[in-house]
Amino acid sequence: MAGKNDAFMKRLLATFTVEADEHIKNITAGLIDLEKDLEPQVKAGMIETVFREAHSLKGAARAVNRSDMETICRSLETVFAELKRREIDLSPSLFDTLHRSVDMLNTITLSPPAEAAAGPVEISRITEKLEQAAGGEIETQEAIGDVKPPPEDAPRTSEPETLSPGPEFPVREIDETARKQKKSMSTVRISMEKLDSLLRQSEEMLTLKLMADRHLEDQLDLAHFFGLWNKQWAKIYPVICEFHRLQEKSEKQDGKRRQDDIRFARLLEFGERTHDNMKILESKLAELRRRSDRDRYATGLMVDNLLGDVKQILMLPFSTLFEAFPKLLRDLSHDQGKDVELSIRGGEIEIDRRILEEMRTVFIHLLRNTIDHGIEKPEARTKNGKPPRGMIQIAVSRSEGNRVEILLTDDGGGIDPGGLKEASCKRGIVSEEEARKLTEQDALPLVFQSGVSTSPIITDISGRGLGLAIVREKIEKFGGRVSIETERHKGTTLRMTLPLTVATFRGVLVTAAERPFIIPTTDVERTVRIKREEIRTVENRETLSLEGITIPLVKLSDVLELSERTDESPVITVLILESRGKRIGFRVDEILTEQEILVKGMSQPLSRVRNITAATILGSGKVVPVLNVSDLVKSAAASAVRPVAPAAPEAGGDTARKTVLVVEDSITSRMLLKNILETSGYLVKTAVDGIDGISQLKTEEFDAVVSDVDMPRMNGFNLTEKIRGDKKLARLPVVLVTALGSREDRERGIDVGANAYIVKNSFDQSNLLETLRRLV
Amino acid sequence: MKKTGGKSHGAPEDPGLVHAKSSEATTEEMRVVLRSRAKALAREPEREGAAEEYLEILAFLLAHETYAIETRFIREVYPLTELTPLPCTPDYIRGIINIRGQILTIIDMKKFFDLPEKGITNLNRVIVVEEGDMAMGILADEITGIRNIPKSDRNPPLPTMTGIHAGYIQGVAGEGLILMDMERFLNDRQLIVHEEVGK
C-alpha cells in the first residue's frame, strides 16, 4: 500500500512540475505583455488571464501539498483581483515585485519540496510585498483570506506527517525523481500534427494483423480441401489397385500388351503421380501454415507493442487524472471539517492526452467548488436527514459518436438560484430587471460567468467565482459542452461532454439483412439469445423481458431501413444497446466476432449519416460501416411511434405485395402463370429461360421463383442449382412446375434444392397458390 | 512551337524505335532501348501553350453518353471490385470503398442527376475526383481515354443531349463530348449528406 502511494506521489509530483511550469510560463508571458503600452480593454483581458493562471497554479500546488507555492499564488491572485477592479495601478515597482514572485515560484517548482523549506523567510517577504501592493488603503474581502497565510503555513506542511505514516522514505525518493527531472528534463515538444500522423500510421498497421489472421484462415480452408481429397483418394485407391491387378493378369494371359492397355497404364500412372504431387503440396502447405502462424504471432506482437506505445503518447485513461483526487478531496474536506466519499466510474475510458491534461485544472476547480459550496458540514447534513458523509460521484461514459460524457454529482446543498441572481446583479452581469425575469432554470447558467459566486465568504479555496468560468472555457475550447442541474438540498450534477478525438476501440461484428455492421463494444450492454416465443407484444410493439425488465425489441435491419426476408429461425440473437439511459434490444442475423477496430472517419461529402458514425476495414479488406448507437436508439424510439405492422414494410397494405419471377419458355404458359399469380395479388415479372431468369434475379429483388423445367439454354434444374449456389439468393423459394412427372425428375428437383415440385398434369391453380403462400 | 492553335502537340520522337530495328541487338542494348522507350512514354505529354489553349480531360462513358472531366480534378482511376453499400443515405450514394486504407465515398451521377436508366450499364470504374476537403469516386461504365481538347472548341450543351442540368456542364466539345463543370459539382452543397435522426 505504501509502495503504491509512493509511486503515485512520484508520478503526481512529476505531473505537477510540468503543469506548474506551464502556468508559470503563461504568467510570465502575461506580465511581459502587460508592461507594454496597450489599450485598457486588452490589458483587462490579460489581467484576467494572469489571474486565472495564478488561480489554477494555486489549485495544483495545493493538490501536491506545496503550501509555499500556494501562498505566493494566493497573494498574486489578490494583486490581480485588485488590478481587475482597478483599485490599484500597474507601477514599475509592482511589476518588479510580480516578476520576482514568479521567479520564486519557478525556483520552488524546480526544487524538491524539502529544499523549498529553506526559504520561508523569502516567501513571507515576497508575499508581504505583494500584499502591500494589493492592499494598503483598501480593506477587501480578499484580505481576510490573505492575512492568514503565515499561521496557516505551519500546520499545513506538517499535515502529510500526520496523515501518511513514515513520510521520510517517500519524500527522499521524490527528491530524487524531482532532481532527475530537473537535470535531464527529458521531454521534447513535438507538434500535434506529427504525433497524429504517427498515430494514424501505426493504427494502419492493425490491418497487417487482421490480414495475417485472414491468411491463416485461408490456409486452413486449403488444408480442409486436402483432407477432403485424401478421403476421396482413400476411396478410389482400391479401385486403382484392382485395375493394376486386372491389367497384369490380362498381360499374362495374352502375353502381349494391347494399345488400350498401354494408354490405360499411362492413365493410372498419371493418377499416382498426381497423388504424389498432392502429398508434396499438402506437406508444403502444412509448413506454410506453421510459418504463417509464427509470422502472425510476431506481427501481432510488434504491431501491438508499437501501437501501444504510440497510443501511450497520445491517449491516457481518465484514471491517470482521477487517481490524484481521493487524496485531494480528503485533504480539502479535512480542512473544512467535512466528510466526503468519492466514487469514480469509467476511469478506464481512454481519452486523448491533450484533453485530459486540460481536464486536470477543470476537475480541481470543480472538486474544490463542490467541497466548498456543495457538501454541507456533517451536522447540517444530519439535520436535513442526509447521511453525515457526503457523496461525490464522477462517472465517465462514452456517449454519442466519438464523445465522452462526464457526470460530476454531489448530494450536497445544491445551488440557490436566488443567491445566484443576486450575485450576478452585483457583478453587473444581468440587470436587476433581467434577474427578476429569469426563471430558476434560466438563472443556472449564470454560475459559469466569471466573478459570480454565491459563497458569502471568499476563502483560500474558493469564493472568487472563477472556478466555473474556467471550467467552461476549458471544456468549450475542445468543442465540449457543460451544463448544470441542481436541486436545493438534494445536490448538483455537472454534465460535461468532451470529444475523444483519436480513440481506438473494439467492435462487435454483426450481420443484419445479410450485411455486416460493427457496433462499438462499449455500447453493447449485453447480448442474449432468446426463443421466438419469448417475444411479447406490448401495445403493438415487440418486447422482450430480461430479468423482469421489459425492453423494447426492434430489428436492426428495420432501423437501418434495409429490407429483409422474414426470418423464421426459432432462436433470435439480440444485442442490448444503451444510450442516455434508454435500453433497446436490437435483433440481428448473427454475431460474428468481437475484435479490435480501426475506426476510419468518413469525409466529405458524408458529413453526417444517420445511424452510421464511421467505417472500418476488416482483415479481408472488406469495408464495414460502424454504427452510431446513440442514433440507433433514437431511430428505434422514433419508429416506435408507428405500430408494428407498417414498421415492417412487407407486412401490410400495398407494400406487402410479393414479387414472383416466372421463368417459362412457352409464351402461353408464361401468360397463364402470370395471370394466375397476378389475380391473387402477386407482382409478377417474367423471364424466357434460365439465363434470363438468373440475370434478373441478380439485379432485382424477388420473393419467389416459379420456373418451368424444360427450357433452352438453361433448364429449371440448372437454374435452381445456380440460385442455391449464390450466396444472396440461396434462401429464395423455388417452385418447379413441369410436365415431367417421373420419380427421377422429382428426385432431381429435390436434389438441386427446389422447395416444391408441381407436375403440370396435376396442376391446378390452388395447388400452386397454396404452395407459394406456404413458402413466402 | 508558337501558339498557332494547331493540334500537333509534338509527339516525341521515339528514340527506341531506330535502335530496335537493328536486329542483332544484345540483351544489354535491348535493355537500354527499352529503358529509353519507357522514359519517352513516361514523359508528360507536351503541353507547350496548352496552359492557355488546351484542357486536359479524361473522357468516360456513362449511360451511353461520353462525359469528360478535367484531369486537374482527378486523383486516379480505380477499378470497382468491392462496394459496401451504406444504409440511411440518399440513393446517389452508392456506398464506400477502401482505397489503400482510405475510405472513399462512391457517387452515382446518374442517380444524382436523375438521368434515365438506359438499358444495362456496367459501372465498374471509379474516377477519384477531389478538391479541397471533398473527395469522392464517380462511377463510370468505361474510361475512353485522356486527351487534350482546345479550350475554344466548346459549344453550349444541346437541350436534347443529356439530363444533366446545364449548370453542371461547361460545354460540349467536338463529337458530343460533354464537359462537366467539376468545380461546381464538387462544391455543390446538395452533394453533402448531413442528416440527423428524426429530421
Image (spheres, coloured by chain):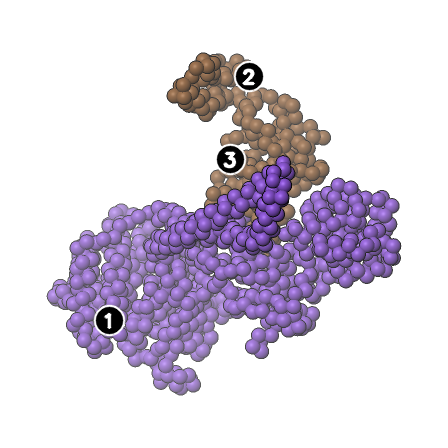
Mark pair 2, 1: CA separation: 83 Å
Question: Dot 3: what SS?
Answer: strand
- Chain that appears brown: B
**Residue B5: percent from left, percent from top:** 54, 15
**Residue B44: percent from left, percent from top:** 46, 24
Q: Quick check: A716 above or below A363?
A: above
The amino acid beneath tag 1 is: Gly
Q: Residue B7 — which label? A: 2
The amino acid beneath tag 3 is: Glu
* Chain A palette colour: purple
The chain letter for the residue carrying disc 1 is: A
The chain letter for the residue carrying disc 2 is: B
Q: Residue B76 — which label? A: 3
Nearer the camera: disc 2 or disc 1: 1
For disc 1, the marked residue is A3
Q: Is residue A694 left or right of residue B31?
A: right
Q: Quick check: A494 above or below A269?
A: below
Q: Is residue A351 left or right of residue A549?
A: left
Q: Residues within 10 Å of mark 2 (few under 14, many from 20)?
A: few
Mark pair 3, 2: CA separation: 26 Å
Q: Quadrant of residue B22?
A: top left
Viewport quadrant of the C terminus of chain B: bottom right
Q: Residues within 10 Å of mark 3 (few under 14, many from 20)?
A: few
Question: Dot 2: what SS?
Answer: loop
The residue positioned 53% from the left and 20% from the top of the image is B53
The chain letter for the residue carrying disc 3 is: B
Which of the marked residues, 3 or 2, is nearer the chain's N terminus?
A: 2
